[in-house]
Amino acid sequence: MKSPAARWAVNVLAITGAALMVWSGVIHLQLWSDGYRDISVIGPLFLIQGIGSIALAPILAAFRRAVLLAAGAALMAATAAGLLLSTGIGLFGFQESLAVPYAGSSLAVEFAGAAVLAAATAIVLAARPRSRPGRR
């Protein structure tokens, strides 16, 4: 990235997105610990989401590559979509409610994280130098 403003924006967005990923991971690990671990399929998914989010966040913040930022955005969006599916039609035989603890904050954190990381991805991709035909 050549532009200092673009570099600064990506740094801020990546760090913010990474913090939101950690927050989402902590919420899922807390819920897993509070009893979701006993729910078939959902329990292991909460554990994977919690550990995966916390593990990916520092890597994403440190390297700020488009593929990592996009993966973080996808993880956050998929996590929010999973919650919405489980409250609407059910997911893996489990029906959730938005009235349960952490549902609202989880959705806010995950949608914000997805948006922030998608914006960082877009800036990184837009700042890539274009290759010109015939030049090496």
Image: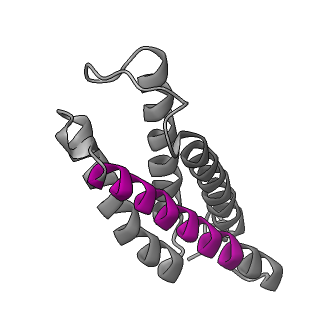
Q: Does the magenta stretch include residue 83?
A: no
Q: Residue furthest top?
A: 89
Q: Which of 114 and 103 is in front in this view?
A: 103
Q: Does the magenta stretch include residue 11?
A: yes
Instruction: Give the residue at x 66% y 63%.
Output: 120
Where does the magenta region start and end?
Answer: 10-33
Q: Where is residue 3 in the image (x, y as percent from the top left)?
A: 79, 81
Using the image, determine if residue 122 lies above or below residue 105: below
Q: Where is residue 32 in the image (x, y as percent from the top left)?
A: 29, 50
Q: Quadrant of the N terminus?
A: bottom right
Q: Nearer the viewer, residue 34 or 7?
A: 34
The dominant secondary structure in magenta is helix
Instruction: Give the residue at x 51% y 63%.
Output: 23
Q: Residue furthest right?
A: 5
Q: Nearer the viewer, residue 11 or 97?
A: 97
Using the image, determine if residue 69 lies above or below residue 90: below
Colour convention:
one colour
Instruction: Give the residue at x 55% y 77%.
Output: 136
Looking at the image, residue 57 sits to the left or right of residue 64; the answer is: left
Q: Nearer the viewer, residue 20 or 60?
A: 20
Q: Where is residue 18 in the image (x, y as percent from the top left)?
A: 54, 69
Q: In which quarter of the view is residue 126 placed?
A: bottom right
Q: How many numbered dots are placed on residues in this image?
A: 0
